[in-house]
Image (cartoon, rainbow, N blue to C red):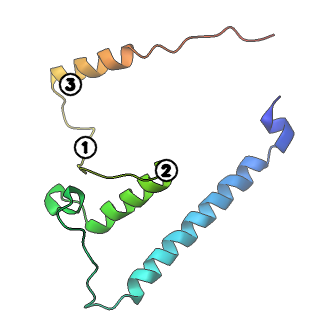
Amino acid sequence: MNLNALLGPGFALVAFTAVGLVLTLLAVAVVYALRLQPQGARTPRVASTPASDSSSGLPEHLVVLLAAAATAAVGRSRIRRVRRLPAADLPSSPWSVTGRAVLQGSHVVPTHAPKP
């Protein structure tokens, strides 16, 4: 059964609009919550967690948002390390290019004949 035929062609547009609206409202709520916090107020820190360490070079609020997203997606989670990936325009070593090609080549997607 075709889901588009069942729900109608405009359903996807309405669903994406609703998700976008909810995310926008959430972002506005976070901004206003941060503005309402007094300037001198300190937020409690978790003692000696590697993710809250500033060695990653990421702002702490970004690490907190990543932790919240991971918890929402998979349930209870613990972030052990956060690091930036190198930019795509930087040259890669031959070892990493070969390893990537071997890994991607091992994931063969079977092709199915179309149903009449």
Residue appearing at x 24%, y 19% in the figure: 99
Amino acid type shown at disc 1: Leu
Q: Return the residue at label 1.
A: 85
x, y (%) of residue 52?
22, 63
Amino acid type shown at disc 2: Ala
Give the answer, above or below, for where 87 lies relative to 91.
Answer: below
Q: 51 or 60, which is in the foreground?
A: 51
How many angstroms separate mark 1 from mark 2 (CA)? 21 Å
- Dot 3 falls on a residue whose secondary structure is helix
Residue appearing at x 38%, y 51% in the figure: 77
Q: Is residue 34 left or right of residue 22?
A: left
Is the Cβ of the residue at disc 1 closer than 8 Å to that at disc 2? no
Q: Quadrant of residue 35?
A: bottom left
Give the answer, above or below, for where 51 lies relative to 2.
Answer: below
- Dot 1 falls on a residue whose secondary structure is loop
Q: Quadrant of residue 14?
A: bottom right
Q: Return the residue at label 2.
A: 73
Quadrant holding the N terminus: top right
Q: Is residue 10 left or right of residue 52?
A: right
x, y (%) of residue 26?
53, 70
Q: How many marks?
A: 3
x, y (%) of residue 107?
43, 17
Q: Quadrant of residue 62?
A: bottom left
Q: Return the residue at label 3.
A: 96
| Mark 1 or mark 2, earlier in chain | 2
